Image (spheres, rainbow, N blue to C red):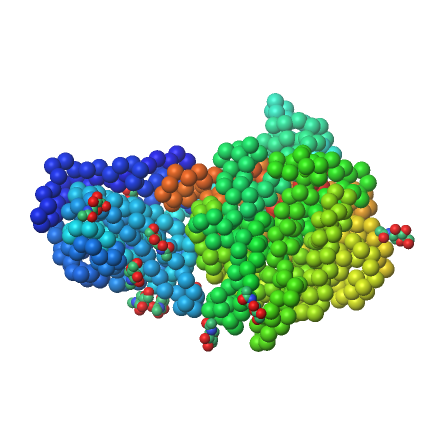
């Protein structure tokens, strides 16, 4: 997107105020470009196209914005008068900026993460600056600070009428917002006039969802010795002929489609195509049927080589507490260290607990603590810049599992995951880079542990000893807008209450880190194991401190989970694998999941951050250990894989999931991990084929021909929801700050059958599940990036690169 500065547009031929005692300049003054507002030449959000009868989206949210009805709808201080259609105020000298103002009296709603355009004209008797704010009042926040969504002093007035435009995207939902122009703060009496005030929400209509060619393929390509499936959207219920063409157009294979009927996940009538029998490598292949041609694709044995590294690079880009180095990632992805306690950052080296009046809202009781912790490092969780131990757990574990499988799987090699394999600062420290990357988060998680001998804290009505437990999360106490670079985040960072789930997630990853770091850095390994033992004991002493669902929207997500039997199972399993000690074996064997059936251990839709029993089962099966009944555990992994394969056999786009929840791409990939692990355990090639075919959906074998990984395939996601990668919203920030697209290898959450966010609420109403996706930066419910989704991709990419 080409950006330019526009100074405020000059509105010609408007009368000027005759300011008392101050002659007007003979030449109109044009504001300098550096005072202007950065806007894009074209608004590219949500494939917005103006509609003839309403080019500006919603009706004007400001009532009587052109003062036709005098000051109706406005509160004016000290007093106003209408002059030539503008509202003019004589502002006394030497008063506070907020002492004189005009503000709307009719409330409007600011929808969080939507996009608004504020326009008005203004001039003054002396050059001065306006201070604009939208202010809200949110009773649900219980008095917690909800900052103004628009708050700017970059509005230079001259003695000539100019037009101003302020695009903005509310960071916080405000149902009762007002707009205020603060006029004071001058050292001489100044007359200020404002006119034609309009506030419009963005217009996204008419919207046309691009669904791509009728033949849906894996746009990254196919392995020569792998399965080759495609899906044709076609209303006919009779088979049609397909042809495979090489890059010279020659037909190299052909056959008949298999009609499937109505794929309820897309509401489309589809056929499947199987061209697995063709195994010659090459580039520029296309599939065709009468009237349809696929995107071109390669057949290559090295399809996933770069993805193995690129999917890991996402984690480096998400790192907190370290400058991201241009030499490693390119200048557009470089940035200063975020959250190292340098203003305007308020963390993360000295981070307090929530204020009591905030936890009164989040925990329904005034919990707090009287210490601060250094919780620097870690990865930013997703599009926000919070850091959550529960989600850090599954993410770190999946990266460590990607590495550990190479130690125990015949024919696998750890070299491609080793020192120098990633573009990270630790690429020449002698330690495997996959371990280095995971350690960045592990180090943060260790710091989240409540110090020994801490004073008791209020939990569910009583003061208890929480020493050794782990804080559930830390994040800003209110949302920041998109885009926000981490080093510019001004909000207060806070620790939230410890939870049993977070504690057990730390145990899991610290136990894994202890055994994997033992050969490289025994001191760190020992530190991890010691912390894990303390945390494990603390969790057993406090087995039901749950993170409640009420702890959301004060700047972070809840990650609530009221069933931690699975977290206990996983923690005991990892502690047993690492130590071989009888206590942990007993705890594994007495856990509910030890004897649970396949569909409980491997639920439909796969494992996820709050449902982790599968992960315990996978590691008990994959990593050498002497647990009683280990063969049953191995058998359960195989049975789980077979269950997912059976689902896949009836899905025309090769998926192992049938439902499309928030972050569905990770559900699919987590199922693939189970099936791929069954292949690692058995070398039964039906598991290999199934796992490879399960990946196709992610790279375009879906109803909207969408590759959900940036930079991979032909039609790939580019506008993921992230404060770092909100290129689409670069116009919203007044400086010429570089806001890139996501890095290559970043994956969107994907189709969500119940999408809910501003663009989705406009353009995805009534969508069939696979079509519930919009590549819009504000669509957090379909298009966010997240570490637990990135880790699913990283595990699968690392496995697939070996096939
Ligand atoms: C003022 O706004 C009203 C309502 O939008 C519109 O009908 C009217 O034409 C406007 N008047 C001027 C002078 O712009
Ligand atoms: C106006 O500004 C002054 C000085 O910044 C501040 O003390 C006061 O609280 C403000 N008043 C309102 C109503 O915001
Ligand atoms: C607001 O200003 C922008 C930039 O000058 C312009 O493109 C847009 O049409 C204006 N909107 C309204 C409602 O006047
Ligand atoms: C604000 O409005 C939204 C959308 O109507 C609603 O979901 C939410 O509950 C409202 N919040 C408050 C505090 O009224
Ligand atoms: C609003 O902006 C002013 C001027 O930049 C700043 O002093 C003030 O702290 C801001 N207010 C909030 C609540 O962020
Ligand atoms: C507008 O919101 C303010 C709080 O910001 C509230 O006091 C007032 O009652 C609201 N007015 C209307 C008409 O809703
Ligand atoms: C008034 O403010 C202007 C601009 O800030 C400054 O140049 C001027 O010296 C000030 N005058 C007085 C009397 O303080
Ligand atoms: C497929 O089934 C769904 C739900 O039963 C229906 O809404 C849709 O129209 C059907 N599509 C086709 C192509 O028949
Ligand atoms: C917490 O909420 C209770 C009940 O509403 C109230 O009595 C108490 O004052 C609040 N405490 C704080 C610190 O806000
Ligand atoms: C924290 O509280 C404990 C007891 O509740 C007290 O002994 C200790 O001095 C407090 N520490 C600080 C830093 O206030
Ligand atoms: C399992 O037990 C055998 C026999 O006691 C022992 O040699 C082996 O090291 C144990 N394996 C692990 C991973 O602890
Ligand atoms: C205090 C106040 O004005 N509350 C209003 C906020 O806006 C909602 C509508 O979104 C009204 O129902 C409330 O009365
Ligand atoms: Ca290294
Ligand atoms: Ca759980």
For image coordinates 15% across by 55% down, the residue present is: 90
Residue 208 left/right relative to 231: left
The percent position of residue 635, horizontal first and vertical second, equals: 82, 55
Please indicate, yes or no, whether residue 512 appears anywhere in the rendered image: no
- Please state, as top left, top right, bottom left or bottom right, where the N terminus lies in the image: top left
Point out the quarter of the image occupied by ligand 4.
bottom left
For image coordinates 73% across by 44% down, the residue present is: 521
Residue 101 left/right relative to 534: left
For image coordinates 14% across by 35% down, the residue present is: 27
Front residue (pair 528, 387): 528
The percent position of residue 697, horizontal first and vertical second, equals: 62, 44
Residue 753 sits in quarter? bottom right
Residue 44 left/right relative to 619: left
Please indicate, yes or no, whether residue 164 appears anywhere in the rendered image: yes
Instruction: Give the mark count.
Output: 0
Q: Residue furthest bottom?
A: 461
- Please state, as top left, top right, bottom left or bottom right, where the C terminus lies in the image: top right
Front residue (pair 652, 290): 652
- Is residue 382 depicted above or below 466 in this figure? above
The percent position of residue 760, horizontal first and vertical second, equals: 46, 52
Residue 481 left/right relative to 698: left
Front residue (pair 101, 714): 101
The percent position of residue 141, horizontal first and vertical second, equals: 43, 66
């Amino acid at each position: 997107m080409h950006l330019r500065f526009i100074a405020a547009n000059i509105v010609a031929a408007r009368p000027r105020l005759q300011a008392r005692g101050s002659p007007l300049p003979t030449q109109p003054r044009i504001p300098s470009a550096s005072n202007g507002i950065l806007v894009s030449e074209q608004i590219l959000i949500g494939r917005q196209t103006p509609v003839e009868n309403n080019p500006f989206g919603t009706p004007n949210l400001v009532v009587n914005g052109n003062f036709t009805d005098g000051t109706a709808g406005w509160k004016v201080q000290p007093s106003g008068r209408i002059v030539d259609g503008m509202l003019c105020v004589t502002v006394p000298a030497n008063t506070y900026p907020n002492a004189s103002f005009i503000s709307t009296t009719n409330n409007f709603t600011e929808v969080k993460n939507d996009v608004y355009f504020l326009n008005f004209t203004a001039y003054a008797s002396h050059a001065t600056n306006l201070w604009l704010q939208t202010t809200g009042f949110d009773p649900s926040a219980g008095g917690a600070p909800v900052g103004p969504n628009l708050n700017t002093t970059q509005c230079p007035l001259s003695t000539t009428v100019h037009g101003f435009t302020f695009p903005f995207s509310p960071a916080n939902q405000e149902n009762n917002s007002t707009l205020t122009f603060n006029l004071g703060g001058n050292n001489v009496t100044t007359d200020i006039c404002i006119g034609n005030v309009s506030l419009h929400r963005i217009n996204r209509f008419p919207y046309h969802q691009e669904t791509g060619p009728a033949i849906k393929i894996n746009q990254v390509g196919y392995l020569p010795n792998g399965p080759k499936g495609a899906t044709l959207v076609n209303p006919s219920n009779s088979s049609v002929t397909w042809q495979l063409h090489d890059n010279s157009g020659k037909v190299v294979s052909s056959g008949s489609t298999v009609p499937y009927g109505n794929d309820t996940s897309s509401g489309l009538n589809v056929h499947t195509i199987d061209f697995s029998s063709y195994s010659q490598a090459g580039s520029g292949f296309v599939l065709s049927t009468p009237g349809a041609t696929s995107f071109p694709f390669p057949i290559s044995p090295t399809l996933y080589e770069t993805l193995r590294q690129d999917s890991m690079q996402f984690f480096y880009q998400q790192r907190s507490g370290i400058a991201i180095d241009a030499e490693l990632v390119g200048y557009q992805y470089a940035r200063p260290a975020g959250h190292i306690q340098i203003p305007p950052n308020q963390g993360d080296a000295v981070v307090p607990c929530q204020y009591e009046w905030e936890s009164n809202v989040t925990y329904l009781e005034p919990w707090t603590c009287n210490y601060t912790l250094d919780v620097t490092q870690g990865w930013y969780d997703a599009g926000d810049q919070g850091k959550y131990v529960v989600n850090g757990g599954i993410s770190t574990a999946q990266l460590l599992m990607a590495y550990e499988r190479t130690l125990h799987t015949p024919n696998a090699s750890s070299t491609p995951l080793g020192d120098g394999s990633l573009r990270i600062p630790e690429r020449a420290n002698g330690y495997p880079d996959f371990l280095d990357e995971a350690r960045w988060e592990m180090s943060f998680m260790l710091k989240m542990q409540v110090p020994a001998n801490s004073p008791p804290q209020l939990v569910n009505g009583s003061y208890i000893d929480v020493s050794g437990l782990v804080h559930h999360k830390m994040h800003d106490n209110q949302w920041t807008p998109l885009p926000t670079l981490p080093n510019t985040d001004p909000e207060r960072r806070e620790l939230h209450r410890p939870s049993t789930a977070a504690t057990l997630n730390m145990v899991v990853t610290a136990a894994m880190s202890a055994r994997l770091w033992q050969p490289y850095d025994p001191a760190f390994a020992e530190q991890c194991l010691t912390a894990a033992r303390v945390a494990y004991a603390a969790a057993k002493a406090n087995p039901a401190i749950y993170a409640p669902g009420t702890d959301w929207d004060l700047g972070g997500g809840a990650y609530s989970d009221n069933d931690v039997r699975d977290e206990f199972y996983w923690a005991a399993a990892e502690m047993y694998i690492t130590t071989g000690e009888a206590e942990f074996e007993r705890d594994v064997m007495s856990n509910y999941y030890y004897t649970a059936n396949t569909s409980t251990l491997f639920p439909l839709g796969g494992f996820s951050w709050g449902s982790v029993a599968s992960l315990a089962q996978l590691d008990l099966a994959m990593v050498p250990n002497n647990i009683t009944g280990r063969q049953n555990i191995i058998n359960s992994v195989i049975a789980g894989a077979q269950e997912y394969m059976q689902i896949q056999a009836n899905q025309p786009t090769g998926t192992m999931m049938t439902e499309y929840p928030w972050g569905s791409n990770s559900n699919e990939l987590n199922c693939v991990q189970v099936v791929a692990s069954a292949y690692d355990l058995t070398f039964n090639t039906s598991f290999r084929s199934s796992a490879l075919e399960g990946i196709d959906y992610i790279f375009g074998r879906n109803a909207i021909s969408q590759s959900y990984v940036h930079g991979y395939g032909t039609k790939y996601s580019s506008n993921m929801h992230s404060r770092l990668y909100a290129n689409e919203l670069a116009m919203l920030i007044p400086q010429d700050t570089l806001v890139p697209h996501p890095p290559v290898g970043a994956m969107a959450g994907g189709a969500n059958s119940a999408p809910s966010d501003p663009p989705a609420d406009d353009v995805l109403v009534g969508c069939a599940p696979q079509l519930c996706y919009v590549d819009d930066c504000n669509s957090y419910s379909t298009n966010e990036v997240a570490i637990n989704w990135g880790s699913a991709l990283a595990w699968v990419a690392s496995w697939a690169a070996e096939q």
